[in-house]
Image (tube, helix red, strand yellow):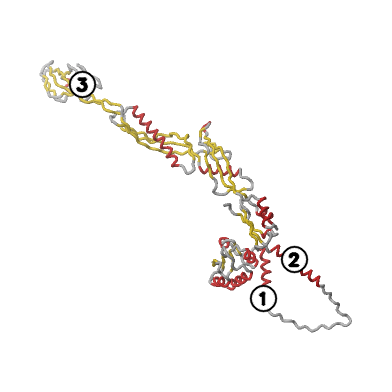
Amino acid sequence: MKTHILQLEASDDLISVRDKMGWSKSGRILLIWPEHGRVLYRRLDLVILQRHSRSLGAKLALVTRDPDVRYYAPRLGIPVYKSLRKAQSSHWKVARRFRKAQVEMEVMQSTEEIGQQEEQPLLQPPRKPIPDRPEPAVPQPSPIARLAFFTLGVLALLAIAATLLPSAVVKLTPVVRTQNISVNLTVDPQESSFSISGLIAARPITVTVEGRDSQQTSGSLRLPDQPASGQIQLTNLTDKPVSVPAGTIVRGLGMDAILFAVTRDGEVSAGPGQTLTLPVRALLPGSQGNLPAQSLVAIEGVLGTRLSATNPEPTLHGTDRLEPAPNEDDRLKLSKKLRQSLDQTVLSEVQNKLAEGDILIPSSLHLLNTLDETFQPADLQPADHLDLNLRLEYQAQFVSAVEIRDLAQAVLDANLPPGYLPLDGTMEIENLTAPEIGQGSMVHWTMQAHRQIQAQLQEPEAIKLSLGLDPLQAKNLLESNLPLAAHPQISLFPSWWPRLPFLPFRIAIVNQAAR
């Protein structure tokens, strides 16, 4: 059902409020009293508003903290609430204890209406006295007795009023204190959870880092430079001349013999024993082509069956050159240097991967795998610089911040003083020592957790201490028996009433946060 909400102003009177209610087209009208100032606090005002609401076919409810309105409204059958949220979420019913008072109020209103009409006397015939049975005289009470009865009635009414009329609101500020506790933590990778004794699990985290570095080479490599050259003497084994084309290959014995090639054409004269000397040059450069005399003894191909060969003089002029090249020591130094650099960066990489509040155990960081290690140039290749591309996989242990907070809260709850409740969102954790590895690879450190806790005030006890006392006595008794952070604040209705109510339900206890 739609609700029409009216916010009253301190300047509103009964007529203006009725006009505002007349604008409503909904089935429920909610009037909100102003925070400051008093408007429409008489019972008659509330009766008129209630009747006007009924004439509009709507239900009426109020939102106010005015003690007069909060006293009369439920007795007239008008629901009253302390906040707009409570009014919107309720079904607009008065409490059971006010329903009898509501009927009495309705009867009182009906009686007042009837009293305003003129009463018509009933005509009855006069009663004739019976001569033989005269009516006995009714004794009339004396003036003193009538005064005594009147006084007793007045006193009874005053006693009832003193019991039912006054109400009070007592505002109490409970004590807030700090709860501190130190916990010695032991991290065990074999554990899967935490225990209140301080044992907590460690979780693995794996990261991959990659780096590249280079350095100047310190080694050298001998490379072939100029090929060796010499003379080959060819001897005819036949009775016919033998032509020798340039490029004919001659060699020594063995599979690894150096090959030489004849550098110009020639012809060996006919007849066995005829000789011819031609120049030769090694096919491969380098000093390996410098051979002693009588080393070249074979001719490849068909000419080898018709000619014999030998070098009467050593082959000369084969040379090598030295080029800068990386050696094994260069590779080891570069690899060590780059690994040390990656060891420094991996800590920040792991920290970036952790969630806020997670605690890394630096001593647990170790190299898990070498995923790639590539040198440029490769082995036995000349270069003046050596490059290395390295990709490594590291693993470390950490403790989850969620598990640390859960452990700290469990320890604080186990040591919570009786009669106190923790305040949400006030717990803080501080590490007193750095994590250290102990025996059996266990990691130990000490943390401190603290939070704010508030005294839990029992409303029945506070009401019992306040019943029937004057405000000063009630304040002193409450301060001496309850854990309070400030002086109690007592508001009486009516304000001139000298004592707090004698009935517990007429005293409302309000707990307010300490400033």
15 or 189, nearer to the observer = 15
Confirm or deny contact between disc 2 and disc 1 (CB under 8 A).
no
Q: Which secondary structure lies at badge 1?
A: helix
Task: Name the quadrant containing residue 217.
Answer: top left
Q: Amino acid at mark 3?
A: Arg
Q: CA distance from mark 3 to mark 1?
A: 147 Å
- In the image, which is nearer the foreground, mark 3 or mark 1? 1
- In the image, which is nearer the foreground, mark 2 or mark 1? 2
Q: Which mark is residue 372?
A: none
- Please tell me how crowded label 2 is: few (under 14), some (14-19), or many (20+) other residues with Cα within 10 Å: few
Residue 446 position in % (x across, y down): 54, 37
Q: CA distance from mark 2 to mark 1?
A: 26 Å
Q: CA distance from mark 2 to mark 3?
A: 147 Å
Q: Is any part of residue 3 visible from this angle?
A: no
- The number of numbered badges drawn on the structure is 3
Task: Name the quadrant containing residue 156.
Answer: bottom right
Residue 240 position in % (x across, y down): 11, 19
Residue 384 position in % (x across, y down): 28, 30
Task: Name the quadrant containing residue 191.
Answer: top right
Residue 206 position in % (x across, y down): 44, 38
Q: Which mark is residue 156?
A: 2
Q: Amino acid at mark 1?
A: Glu
The residue positioned 72% from the left and 81% from the top of the image is 120
Classify residue 260 as left or right of residue 440: left
Q: Is residue 405 above or below residue 8?
A: above
- Please tell me how crowded label 3 is: few (under 14), some (14-19), or many (20+) other residues with Cα within 10 Å: many
Residue holding disc 1? 113
- In the image, which is nearer the foreground, mark 2 or mark 3? 2
Residue holding disc 3? 251
